[in-house]
Image (cartoon, rainbow, N blue to C red):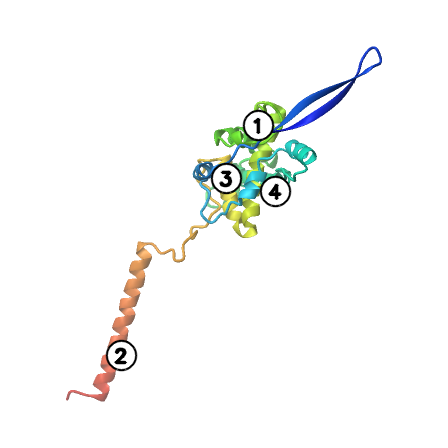
Amino acid sequence: MTNTMLKVRLDVQNNETVKMILKLKQIPEKKPITHQDIQDLIEKLKIPDLLDINLNLLDQSRVHPRYSKIVSRILDVNTPCYSGLAFIGDAFVNFVATIIIYNEYGLQSKNTNGIHPVCTGGVLSELSTVFKSNRFLAQRAKDLDWDRFLVHNQREIRADTKKGDKAYADMIEGLIGCLYSSNGVEQIPEVCEVVKNILVPNSQMTFLSSNENKLFNYDGYDIIGFFLIGCGIGMLAMFFIVMTIIEYYPFY
């Protein structure tokens, strides 16, 4: 289903007359994002349970700016686009990509005397640029099957063109911006973890602490240790009780 408008164009003819051309212009409807689509995205990106997803922001994160302008002008309906969300999403991509490259290639332990750089700053910057490129992010949108939700006003946006790559890259950054805006600064490590899963899905590096989602993080050895300490304190208390009884009530 589409919204339509009547577009009027005036053409000046060779005989100095003006021809009025009427044309119906259609505005494509948004493809709905279902609950199952969101669940699939959560599984693919391993989005932590601590992160909320604001559905209004999620919808905004896929709206192309030109589509937003046309809808606002034609239908007089406010349809925010992903530009603002993509701005903060781009910052997360730059930061996480830099951390990943630094951890992989920036430092290397040599003997026990210290840590020495493997690559120069210029090389590290060039390596991280790969993860920040529109082409790479657009491909990740396609890999995640998220590219099909892009809302635009063109017949087709191809991911292998400069314009298409930018649109899909901005869309992915908009998704990251949605996660940050839905949760705030308190959950920045969790958002960084999702960004890492977007850029390098198989990386063993993590931005999450080992105490994540655990009130008490005791393993088996900790429990045994506490048990033995408790037994020791109990035996010591019993010893003092017995000695007190013997002192006041001697048996001889």
| Secondary structure found at label 3 | helix
* Most distant residue in the right direction: 16
Q: Which is in the foreground here, disc 4 or disc 3?
A: 4
- Identify the residue shown where x is 68% and y is 33%: 74
Q: Which quadrant would residue 204 be assigned to in this image?
A: top left
Say which residue label 1 marks: 135
Callout 1–callout 3 Cβ contact below 8 Å: no
Query: Which numbered disc, 4 or 1, marks the residue that appears first in the sequence?
Result: 4
Say which residue label 4 marks: 88
- Identify the residue shown where x is 64% and y is 32%: 67
In the image, 17: left or right of 134?
right
Say which residue label 3 marks: 196
Say which residue label 2 marks: 240
Q: Which quadrant would residue 91 be assigned to in this image?
A: top right
Q: Where is residue 164 in the image (x, y as percent from the top left)?
A: 60, 26
Q: Where is residue 209 in the image (x, y as percent from the top left)?
A: 45, 50
Query: Where's the N terminus, which quadrant?
Result: top right
The amino acid beneath tag 3 is: Lys
Q: Which is in the foreground here, disc 2 or disc 1?
A: 1
Q: Position of residue 214 (x, y in %)?
A: 40, 54
In the image, 73: left or right of 232?
right
Q: Is residue 51 above or below residue 173?
A: below
Q: How far apart are marks 3 and 2 (CA)?
A: 57 Å
The amino acid beneath tag 4 is: Ile
Q: Nearer the viewer, residue 14 or 98?
A: 14
| Secondary structure found at label 2 | helix
Q: Which of 122 and 112 is in front in this view?
A: 122
Query: Which numbered disc, 4 or 3, marks the residue that appears first in the sequence?
Result: 4
* Most distant residue in the left direction: 252
The amino acid beneath tag 1 is: Arg
Mark 4 burial class by Cα count in 10 Å: few <14, some 14-19, many 20+: some
